[in-house]
Amino acid sequence: MVYNRQKRAPIVDALIEFKSNRVVPFDVPGHKRGKGNPELAEFFGEKCVSIDVNSMKPLDNLCHPISVIAEAEELAAEAFGSSHAFFMVNGTSSAVQAMIMSVCKSGDKIILPRNVHRSVINAMILSGAVPIYINPQINQTLGISLGMSFSDVEKAILAHPDAKAVMVNNPTYYGICSNIKAITELAHRKGMLVIADEAHGTHFYFNDDMPLSAMEADADMAAVSMHKSGGSLTQSSFLLTGKRMNPNYVRQIINLTQTTSGSYLLMASLDLSRRNLALNGEKIFKTISELADYAREEINGIGDYYAYSKELINGDTIFDFDVTKLSVNTMNIGLAGIEVYDLLRDDYNIQAEFGDLGNILAYLSIGDRYRDIERLVGALSEIRRLYKKSKLGLLKHEYINPIAVMTPQKAFYSANEFVTLEKTEGRICAEFVMCYPPGIPIVSPGEQITKEIIEYIRYSKDKGCFLTGMEDKGVESLKVTL
């Protein structure tokens, strides 16, 4: 019965029926099904622009769904094993913000790893929540930050019993998972809620060999990027909630920041992608796992590169590993990950997900093929042959433990001034600096700028990382508090 229900796609069905009715549009959008902008219709196609429509009676309303969107959300909740699922069309960033604002009011504490996406810190600027950071341990060989140690979470909970929630990355960009079940059980015993950033964990819900999902671990909320590994259109995501959350209140929080003009293109893509994963996800992600294992074997056979996987698991800071993440360390060929990333893109027309100072990530999902892997392997082999050099002088890790002095909100809105980068040592940052992707801040509002951070920013800039988050796009100066 559940399987048969998952064959439905209510939003898509409603759009098909709407289109067949040949409704005359005296509403927005102003292109009027493409008639007002022929170039738009030609570029996107008539099928696309004809369903780029606004909320109306037969199509429901994203802010207050009572018919087809409500049914589609029920199907999504069923597919993900959550109590409720919300369609998010402002990206997973807005889902993360809604999570934090649902569990924390101004002045409330939240325990979280510092290697979070910038959307988390943005949410604390908006809400006034107070971060209690857990600095992740570092794998010195790979230069990557790990998951949260259970003992570190326990210490933070005992030190801050008034915290309202604990946040977990499940997984990190590199595929590393914390022990989310044990953390959730501990937090609940102490009266705290648990929220999970599952931007890179959509597939955890649709294959039994994947790491444990947040909803399986009994977490209270999870932000899920369907557009990453789930196959929907960019900017479309789900926000999942568990039995302890009031969905009506969460909806109010979502409506504070999410658009009132929900895109039916994005919602239809969520509807279709949920159906595809519910019906075929087990097989799809088994195939992707096999593809990733094959890629790792081939890349490790080249020499010097290290495509890592479950052998890293240590039962704590690396409690589990997402095998679909093709993370590759490049330091033994003497090149930073960003340098390999640039070579792949500029010389081989291969677009990796990101490159940082020691690694690249090739994001594998439902659209990849073995012949694409062969092309990647061939390019990496040639890059090693042509560009290998001594690794002396390369920075050894991509994460610096910050010194948090002020809340993100207070620092961001404080009186401030711009100071040249070299003269910022010891000052409190009032903005972000980060490499994007992955979007984990090097320094964020409220943190003290150290000599190590200044050197890291300079190094990242010299290596060609795309630095973002600050007003001065050349990163010659930073905004600091007075």
Image (cartoon, rainbow, N blue to C red):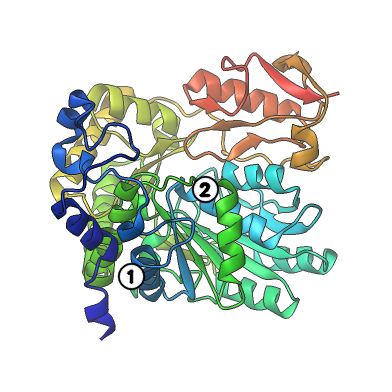
Left or right position of 351 against 188: left
Q: Quadrant of the C terminus?
A: top right
How busy is the neighbourhood of tag 2: few (under 14 within 10 Å), some, or many (20 plus)?
some
* Label 2 residue SS: loop
Nearer to us in this view, 456 or 15:
15
Residues at circles 2 and 1 in contact by the CB criterion of under 8 Å:
no
Distance from label 2 to label 1 (Cα)?
27 Å
Per the image, the residue denoted by label 2 is 258
User: Relative to residue 153, is residue 342 depicted above or below?
Assistant: above
Amino acid identity at mark 2: Gln
* Label 1 residue SS: loop
- Going 70% across and 64% down the picture, which residue do you hit? 165
Nearer to us in this view, 249 or 229:
249
Say if residue 335 shows up in the picture: no
- Residue 244, label in figure: none
Residue 380: image x %, image y %?
Answer: 27, 35
- Residue 206, label in figure: 1
- Going 68% across and 24% down the picture, which residue do you hit? 454
Residue 234, located in which quarter of the rendered image?
A: top left
How busy is the neighbourhood of tag 1: few (under 14 within 10 Å), some, or many (20 plus)?
many
Left or right position of 387 against 47: right
Nearer to us in this view, 90 or 249:
249
Q: Quadrant of the N terminus?
A: bottom left
Residue 384: image x %, image y %?
Answer: 30, 31
Amino acid identity at mark 1: Phe
Left or right position of 37 against 456: left
Residue 287: image x %, image y %?
Answer: 21, 63
* Callout in the foreground (2, 1): 2
Left or right position of 430 against 344: right
Residue 281: image x %, image y %?
Answer: 26, 68
